[in-house]
Image (spheres, grey):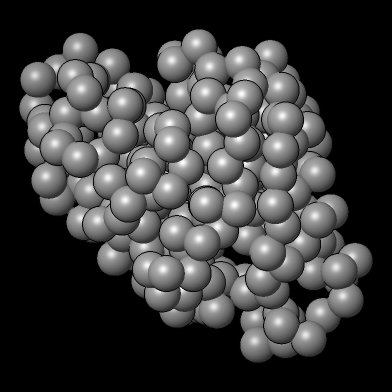
């Protein structure tokens, strides 16, 4: 294992949402790292119509976004540029089947020739790392999206005992959610038997809210940003540390 600062790539649709939250967390995490976005574009014919799509069409579009061929195209020319790459579009990392999720990761490995992870894998690994067997989900998604996320969570041996669904339509809308709305969603997801609350969406700006979210939930809250960054470090055998970033960053 090299002691050099790792170089990370993020597969993310930057045309529709920013990466402020990733930069904020990675910028204060030790060991230092570089974080570079590799754009994973939404299918061109539907890019500006996400908010008006039916649930079925929206799910199909997200599935196409995360298809291994789309990942391969996005990473073309990225061989040997990074130590690890993450598929950081939360819904695209869980909308397909568990076997397709594995193909997403092997596609990253073979195309970018580096370690691979995803936001979904980050959640799975984090729950195993913390030994959390009962959780609640503060979902920004339509219910059928949340169903797919929970199917993947179950693969880690974790039970979801409570959930809320905010039924948001686009990542652009989510990037504009204010602090109070995010905290309220987590508050509604709190449950006395849940050991952890999961907040699965990388478009949300949550890094500055760690303490407020814990106060609302009464237990640790794992955000999509946290698990993605933590899993990138884990993929290269490093242990990240950061203040006020939740239980994954205690070193």
Measured as percent of width and height from the top left, residue 208 is found at 25, 57
Outermost residue on the front side: it is 192
Q: Seen in the image, is 181 located left or right of residue 167?
A: left
Q: Quadrant of residue 23?
A: bottom left
Is 190 in front, or is 103? 190
Please give the name of the residue rendered at 55% of the width and 79% of the height, measured from the top-left corner. 173
Would residue 102 be seen by someone viewing this image from the given angle? no
Q: Seen in the image, is 180 located left or right of residue 199?
A: left
Q: From what the image shows, is residue 8 above or below residue 250?
A: below
Q: From what the image shows, is residue 178 above or below residue 219?
A: below
Measured as percent of width and height from the top left, residue 35 is found at 24, 50
Would residue 207 be seen by someone viewing this image from the given angle? yes
Q: Quadrant of the C terminus?
A: top left
Q: From what the image shows, is residue 31 above or below residue 69?
A: above
Please give the name of the residue rendered at 31% of the width and 26% of the height, measured from the top-left corner. 247
Please give the name of the residue rendered at 63% of the width and 42% of the height, measured from the top-left corner. 137
Q: Quadrant of the N terminus?
A: top left
Is 48 in front, or is 149? 149
Q: Quadrant of residue 223?
A: top left
Measured as percent of width and height from the top left, residue 232 is found at 35, 33
Measured as percent of width and height from the top left, residue 207 is found at 29, 53
Please give the name of the residue rendered at 37% of the width and 63% of the height, measured from the top-left corner. 205
Is 248 in front, or is 97? 248
């Amino acid at each position: 294992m090299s002691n050099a600062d790792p170089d990370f790539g993020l597969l993310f649709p930057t045309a529709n949402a920013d990466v402020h939250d990733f930069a904020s967390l990675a910028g204060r995490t030790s060991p230092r790292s570089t974080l570079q976005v590799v754009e994973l574009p939404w299918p061109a014919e539907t890019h500006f119509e996400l908010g008006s799509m039916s649930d079925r069409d929206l799910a199909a579009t997200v599935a196409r976004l995360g298809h291994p061929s789309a990942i391969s195209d996005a990473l073309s020319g990225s061989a040997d540029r990074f130590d690890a790459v993450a598929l950081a579009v939360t819904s695209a990392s869980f909308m397909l089947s568990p076997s397709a999720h594995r193909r997403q990761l092997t596609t990253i490995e073979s195309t970018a020739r580096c370690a691979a992870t995803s936001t979904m894998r980050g959640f799975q690994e984090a729950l195993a790392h913390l030994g959390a067997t009962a959780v609640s989900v503060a979902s920004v998604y339509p219910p059928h999206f949340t169903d797919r996320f929970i199917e993947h969570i179950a693969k880690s041996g974790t039970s979801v005992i409570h959930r809320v669904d905010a039924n948001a339509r686009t990542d652009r809308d989510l990037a504009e959610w204010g602090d109070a709305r995010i905290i309220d969603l987590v508050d509604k997801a709190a449950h006395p038997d849940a050991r952890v609350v999961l907040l699965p969406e990388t478009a949300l700006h949550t890094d500055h809210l760690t303490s407020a979210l814990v106060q609302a939930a009464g237990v640790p809250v794992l955000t999509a940003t946290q698990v993605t960054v933590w899993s990138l470090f884990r993929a290269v055998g490093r242990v990240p540390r950061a203040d006020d970033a939740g239980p994954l960053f205690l070193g």
